[in-house]
Image (tube, rainbow, N blue to C red):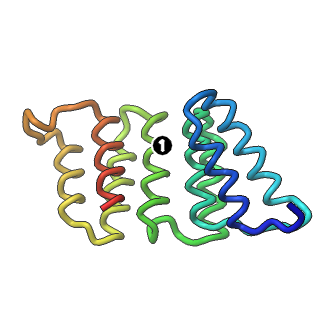
Amino acid sequence: MTVRSCVTWNAMLTGYCSKSKKAKDCAFDALVLFREMLVGINGVKPNDTTMICVLSACSQLGVLETGACVHGYIEKTIYLPENDVFIGTGLVDMYSKYMPGTSEDYVALSNVYASAERWLEVESVRREMKGDFSEANKMSRGQFLHGIATAEACK
């Protein structure tokens, strides 16, 4: 393909990040492709879909340092992640997988929901953070954060 747009790059990145077989190899390839997108001849500027795929690749590979750099890139070049529930959820998902036992992921998820004015979800996350949850809601912290973030962001 001679001319590549953000749409064509995103199609490739999404393809790599969606692979279940050899997921780590494909996630690595997605990060290589993202670098090529940024520094290539065309110099295409990524959008929110691009960044969600890149965050997913970082999460799949377990490269928190790279993910933190991507987070900084998002804040500096695109917009504040608090304005986008999907990017915010991707960030929380990435950080919560690799920072167990901290309250920062609860606060981050709560802030994502608050910025989207989802007050019931904010209340739910804060109750969970305080340990105030019913028998029906007892699950691992990672399951709670991933489940709530994924389900609510897709509504």
Instruction: Read off the residue under disc 1.
Output: 95
- Other-residue count near label 1 (Cα within 10 Å), few / some / many at <14 / 14–19 / ≥20: many
Residue plotted at (35% across, 61% down): 111
Furthest-top residue in this view? 22
Residue plotted at (34% across, 51% down): 149
Q: Element under label 1? A: helix
Q: Position of residue 24 (x, y in %)?
A: 63, 30
Q: Is 149 positioned to the left or the right of 94 in the image?
A: left
Q: Position of residue 126 (x, y in %)?
A: 21, 52
Q: Position of residue 52 (x, y in %)?
A: 55, 55
Q: Is 5 positioned to the left or the right of 108 in the image?
A: right
Residue plotted at (57% across, 72% down): 79
Q: Count the numbered circles shown.
A: 1
Q: Is 95 positioned to the left or the right of 28 in the image?
A: left
Location of the N terminus (image quadrant): bottom right
Location of the C terminus (image quadrant): bottom left
Q: Position of residue 87 (x, y in %)?
A: 49, 59
Q: Nearer the viewer, residue 149 or 109?
A: 149
For badge 1, the amino acid type reads Tyr
Q: Nearer the viewer, residue 117 or 51?
A: 51
Query: Vertical placement of 124 versus 18: above or below?
Result: below
